[in-house]
Image (cartoon, rainbow, N blue to C red):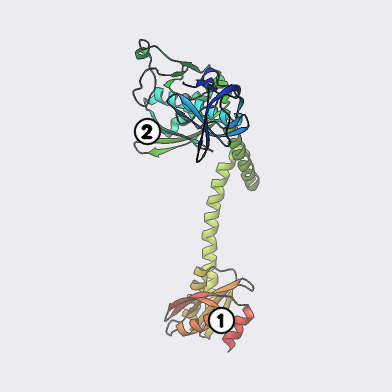
Amino acid sequence: METLKLYYENCHRREFISTVTSCREAKEGFWVTLNATAFYPEGGGQDYDTGILGTARVLAVREEEGIVLHLCDSPLAVDTIVEGRVDWEKRFDLMQQHTGEHIVSGIIHKMFGSHNVGFHMGSDVVTIDFDAPIPLEILPEIERQANEAVFLNLPVLCSYPSPEELPQVQYRTKKALPWPVRIVEIPGFDTCACCGVHVANTGEIGYIKILSCIKFHEGVRMEMICGGRAVTYMGKIFEQNRLVSQAFSAKLLETGSAAQRMNETFSEEKFRAVSLERRLFDAIARSFRDKGDVVYFGEALDSATVRQLADKIADSCGGTAAVFSGKDGEGYSFALVNKSGDVKALGLSLNEALSGRGGGKPGFFQGSVKATRNEIKAFFNK
Ligand SMILES: [Zn+2]
């Protein structure tokens, strides 16, 4: 006998009394059936409910030919009366996301005639795939209309039209469905064939936020969130913006332009730093003109600039230029350059003496050593 589906009679029913009609042991737990249940099985892109059934925990729920099967972590005796309690936080969140998805899909269907062809309610965001492009500039208008549907606190109506009535009903569907079809209507916004559970009135959704919309196959993939999730998410966004606002000394609604200005300033400063560094390197190189072999310690240089400086000094000194940069305890990166000689043997013996790594070719050798400044100096004094 089919299970009486209390979740369709009243979507807010979270506690109920029922009789155990069967209990079958399986590898994953105990599959329990009841004569009536408020536990929603998975379906229509919506996850199943969890909760408590008598002394057992309900881990998963599914439906087979009208019978709702509850996967429990312990057995329940057949014919006993049990009390069921649905994990309401999870269910209400899913109802908020699901009903919000109806509204957004309905608005987009009306605007562009495009269909929702894929729907996924993840643990963080809801994704909807549409089969046609949606211009990005229209997203704020879609979101405005969706939240208008929330503010109007419209009833979410469910009905099973008769075989005669059904052909007259204009509704969204992924495929032709056999009668009876459950029609879910949000007046003025959406009419859709759906087996899921929804909030009773749109005001319960609270808030609908569209997060992104990117090209996907022939159409787009949209990310959105509703209700409590949206409030939590927007709270986190606000907190991040508050930190950005503090860091940039910008007003909360002017952080974007402040970040842009900061980026431009940073690029200019980087350009200035590079040209100053070039002039400094030229000056350092000139100070070693015709001095022969040189060992030089530079301040806070990365491996690319260590190499540049070694190159310039080698051009000027006429011997081998050995440039190091780093800190005692953290190690030093180095470059050895000789424009007319071979520094490979020197590089290899440096590696061996000072636990270094690196390599190169005859006139150039680059690497790093785990040694102190004094140890490096002692190596070259030898
Ligand atoms: Zn639905």
Residue 186 to residue 291: above or below: above
How many dots with numbers?
2
Residue 204 picture quarter: top right
Q: Residue furthest front?
A: 78
Three-letter amino acid code of the residue under disc 1: Val
Horizontal and vertical percent position of residue 262:
56, 50
Q: Where is residue 329 drawn, in percent x and y?
A: 64, 72
Q: CA distance from mark 2 to mark 1?
A: 63 Å
Residue depicted at 37% across the width and 33% down the height: 133
Q: Secondary structure at mark 1?
A: strand
Residue picked out by circle 2 = 133
Other residues around mark 1 within 10 Å, as few (<14) / some (14–19) / many (≥20)? some
Compared to residue 136, the image places residue 79 above or below, namely: above
Question: The C terminus lies in which quarter of the figure?
Answer: bottom right
- The residue located at (49%, 23%) in the rendering is 145
Q: Can you name the residue that lies furthest to the bottom here?
A: 382
Residue occupying image coordinates x 38% and y 26%: 112
Question: What's the amino acid at mark 2?
Answer: Pro
Residue 58 appears in the picture as rendered: yes
Name the residue that disc number 1 marks.
295
- Does residue 132 appear to the left or right of 242 in the view shown? left
Answer yes or no: is residue 317 visible: no
* Residue 130, quarter of the rendered image: top left
The residue at label 1 has a CB less than 8 Å from ligand 1: no
